[in-house]
Image: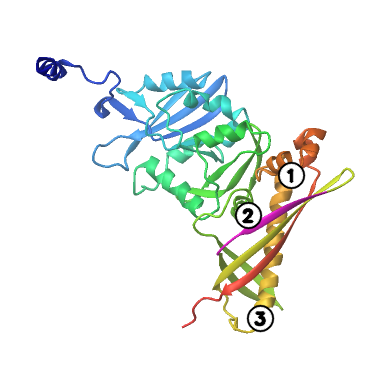
Amino acid sequence: MRKVTVFFLISTFFLSGCWDQRLYKELSVISVVGIGGHIGELKNYYAYPSSGTDPTQYIVLEGEGKTAREVRIDANKKTEQTMDIAELTTILVSEETAKDDLYALLDVYYRSAQSPMTAKVMVTEGTSKRFLELKETIPKEIGEYYLDFVQSFEDSTIFPKTNLEMTANLMFSEGRDLALPYLKTSSDKALPQAEGLALFNGKKYTGKYLTLRESTFATLLGYRKARIVELAYLWNKKGEKVSVAFDVIRFKKKKKVIQDGDNIKIQYKINMPIVMTEYPPDHLDRKQVRKELENFIERSVEKDINRMFKKSQEASSDILGIGEYIRAYHPQLWREGKWKDIYKDIKIEAKVNAEIVRSGSIR
């Protein structure tokens, strides 16, 4: 037995290394990909660090081809090292490209064992190349920059948490549609700016997007509150403009489906305890003042929510997953016809109850 043990210990010194090991010095580690064009005439952009000591320096490779795989092969020929996407953080898709079959563009990532399913997918105004040619030096590696950028909006409950895996699931879902972060660039410094959520119908971008505030309520109603929710309004109170800002402590919602013949109505009841963060007139210790302010906040929030519903229905984009609720609790409505045909015409309304539980500290 001792001889066998010694034999195995000695034999380990002659074993080869891992068959699939990859050395960083032999790779161009891609952290951000930009997708443009259309199937049959695609052009993609791949960003990777160009300096081992300065992570803010990077190179953008361009690839062209008829298919997503052909584009990558073409780009790979233009670098002295092999392209590697194991540390991919972000995929930027041009808005015109996203109006095609998005899954067909991303299929190459789902079929690769190297692709991280945690990578973020975002839609860009205009060409995605512009978002890889930032004029102002960013303080960190570009992939890390974009990842931190979108996660900050997720933490603020402006964007729902999404990634490559969730994107695929929602593209094939019958009861909920996909919504992806929509980016623009500032005119002066060309840095990315979040504009809201791009609305999808199935696998295609509808060309419509929600504003940041509308995106916040879509995330609250369709997903859940993240770490913080900050909102601000300007109140035209008796001819005087008054700043109103508050943090949402909790956001509890209940929905009810009411059917009257062929007419369907969905009611949301929302309870929203808040803490005031800005209100110059003060005197919030007075019951009448608090009630008047609460009424203004309720009307403002209801208006934004109704605007968000209207945009989503016009785009036939059920990003709140109302269809999932209908299929689970009202299957007879689901069986009556295609949900999207019903969704566009149903009446959706929200009733908000705002309660100021803390007025902030005044010194």
Q: Earlier in the sequence, mark 3 or mark 2?
A: 2
> What secondary structure prevails in the magenta region?
strand
Residue type, mark 2 in image: Phe
Which residue matches tag 2? Answer: 217
Instruction: Say above or below: 4 vs 278.
Output: above
Q: Residue at x 39, y 35 (%)?
A: 31
**Total marks placed:** 3
Q: Secondary structure at mark 2?
A: helix
Q: Position of residue 205 (x, y in %)?
A: 63, 36
Query: Observer-nearest residue: 56 or 216?
Result: 216
Identify the image's colour scheme: rainbow, by chain, secondary structure or one colour: rainbow
Q: Residue at x 71, y 78 (%)?
A: 238
- Magenta part of the chain: 249-258
Within 10 Å of the Cα at label 2, are there few (<14), some (14-19), or many (20+) other Cα atoms? many
- Mark-to-mark CA distance, 3 and 2: 26 Å
Q: Position of residue 187 (x, y in %)?
A: 51, 49
Q: Quadrant of the N terminus?
A: top left
Q: Is residue 21 left or right of residue 259?
A: left
- Quarter where residue 243 is shown: bottom right
